[in-house]
Amino acid sequence: MKKRLLALSLLMSHGVLADTAYVTNEKDDTLSVIDTNTLTVIDTLEVGMRPRGIIFSQDFRYLYICASNSDAVQVMDVSTHKIIHNLPSGEDPEQFALHPNNRFLYIANEDDAVVTVVDTEKRDVIAQIDVGVEPEGMAASPDGKWVINTSETTNMLHWIDAKTQTLVDNTLVDQRPRHVEFSEDGKRLWASSEIGGTVSVIDVDSRTISHTIRFKIPGVHRDKIQPVGVKLTSDGKYAFVALGPANHVAVVDANTYEVLDYLLVGRRVWQLAFADNQTRLLTTNGVSGDVSVIDVNKLKVIKTIKVGRYPWGVAVKP
């Protein structure tokens, strides 16, 4: 037993036990599969039309894929990389959130101004909730109480009671909110506004904005600074914000809300995901067709990985 544990420790210390990242390429209708040990693409998988949002089930057995132009959420068996069935998603699914119960999937239907709630076990629609115009971002609170949707044209965050599946409140934010992310303790909600050029930090108890973060990059016109994806470290230290056509990721102190640095990545950086116990951050860069790898401890870009055309979403399996 001691020898086996020693061998496992050596493997881990040498980085052999790598994570696997899955990247949606919306113009190729494919997923690129990346080994985070070698930082190379190890497979390319065909999926439905215009894949965008992507998340794992909590046990990492299944990968859910928003195939937007197929009007479907596809379910992939991770062990075989085969699509095993589609879920009834409503029209043009773009992003979604999986409830902590690992069963209810909340899907933003951009063209219909609704959030569709699907029971992933029964494969049935259990609710459709009217929200604002062009819904996109989705997030579920860690305690399972709230599900938040952003509507790009209405400029609001919509608060859905996950127990009753009803809309109970709205929070007005800056123009074109795209992504929402809860802090690890569920007390704060971070919301990016693409055209407004800001990130709003919302107090969850009061459902009001407590801080507004603005960005300024030397040599980059302010119109190009368009916040989209947001990721927070679980230790509460950093927030990373993808700034779209500004081609940078902002590093924000998650406690003081000070912008600490801007990291140059690929063109039109869109979504973000942590890998390797949050020691690395992966970014999808749509126009340059690649993924940037950021060393979280050093706050430095260490690698660029070529993937398919217009990478959009990214999810990581440990």
Image (cartoon, rainbow, N blue to C red):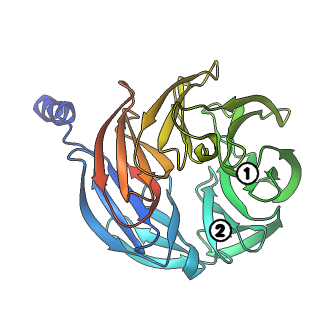
Figure quadrant of the N terminus:
top left
Q: Residue furthest top?
A: 256
Q: Amino acid at mark 2?
A: Asp
Sequence-earlier tag: 2 or 1: 2
Q: Amino acid at mark 1?
A: Val
Query: Which residue is disc 1 drawn over?
Result: 147
SS at circle 1: strand
Indicate the quadrant where residue 264 lies.
top left
Q: Say whether residue 308 is left or right of residue 148.
A: left
| Label 2 neighbour load within 10 Å: few <14, some 14-19, many 20+ | some
Q: Is residue 80 visible?
A: no
The residue depicted at 64 percent of the width and 30 percent of the height is 185
Indicate the quadrant where residue 12 lies.
top left
Query: Which residue is disc 2 drawn over?
Result: 119
- Image: 199 above or below 25: above
Q: CA distance from mark 2 to mark 1?
A: 15 Å
The residue depicted at 61 percent of the width and 21 percent of the height is 258
Residue 20 image position (x, y, % from top left): 32, 52
Q: Say whether residue 243 is left or right of residue 166.
A: left
Q: Say whether residue 11 is left or right of residue 211.
A: left
Which residue is at the front of the view, 207 or 146? 207
Q: Residue furthest right?
A: 168
Indicate the quadrant where residue 143 lies.
top right
Labelled disc at residue 105: none
Residue 135 image position (x, y, % from top left): 73, 62
The residue depicted at 45 percent of the width and 63 percent of the height is 63
Asked if marks 2 and 1 touch (Cβ < 8 Å), the reply is no
Report how many numbered discs are placed on residues in the image. Answer: 2
